Amino acid sequence: RTTCAEGECPVGTEEVVPLDGLPTCSSCNPGSYRADGMEFCEECPVGRIAPEKGAEQCIRCPTGEYSPEAGSMNCSACSPGFVPSADGGTCNICKAGTFASLGAAACLPCPA
């Protein structure tokens, strides 16, 4: 925490006014972020994470992984037979005649 003038907190932090009334800048919690132009820290959307405190932005889950809840700190691999949705928020089942291994990015045709 650092003492700051009102409205002057750097990205990745937000202004907190404690009981003594002196504004301080407090890091955003893991799973949330604050970019330039935002007033407060906000939760990362589904499919994106902020693993550490003080994030300036959320990052997409790695290929083959998903994050189903807003405010997540980590991603998970999709189960065999499933692949992440385009937004990384869910896992979709592979269509008949295709398969996916644990953490795969795409369903592949079954061998003949």
Image (spheres, rainbow, N blue to C red):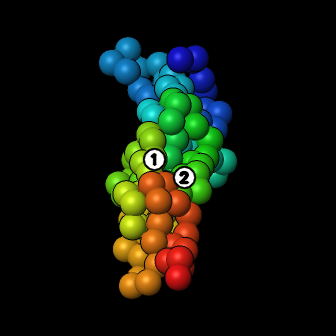
In this picture, is 96 found above or below 56?
below
Q: Earlier in the sequence, mark 1 or mark 2?
A: 2
Which residue is drawn at the image coordinates 50% and 77% (left, top)?
110
Of residues 29 and 77, which is closer to you in this image?
77
In this picture, is 23 found above or below 79?
above
Which residue is drawn at the image coordinates 37% and 21% (left, top)?
18
Q: Could you tell whether 18 is left or right of 84 in the image?
A: left
Q: Could you tell whether 50 is left or right of 91 in the image?
A: right
Q: Which mark is residue 75?
A: 1
The image position of residue 32, as x and y in percent, is: 47, 43
Tell me if I can see residue 43 in this picture.
Answer: no
The picture quadrant where one finds residue 8 is top right
The image position of residue 15, as x and y in percent, is: 50, 32
Q: Residues within 10 Å of mark 2 (few under 14, many from 20)?
A: many
Alpha carbons under labels 1 and 2: distance apart: 6 Å
In this picture, is 4 found above or below 30?
above
Q: Residues within 10 Å of mark 1 (few under 14, many from 20)?
A: many
The picture quadrant where one finds residue 2 is top right
At label 2, the amino acid type is Cys
Determine whether label 1 and label 2 are within 8 Å by CB: yes
Of residues 26 and 32, which is closer to you in this image?
32
- Under tag 1, what secondary structure? loop
Which residue is drawn at the image coordinates 41% and 26% (left, top)?
17
At label 1, the amino acid type is Cys
Q: Which mark is residue 61?
A: 2
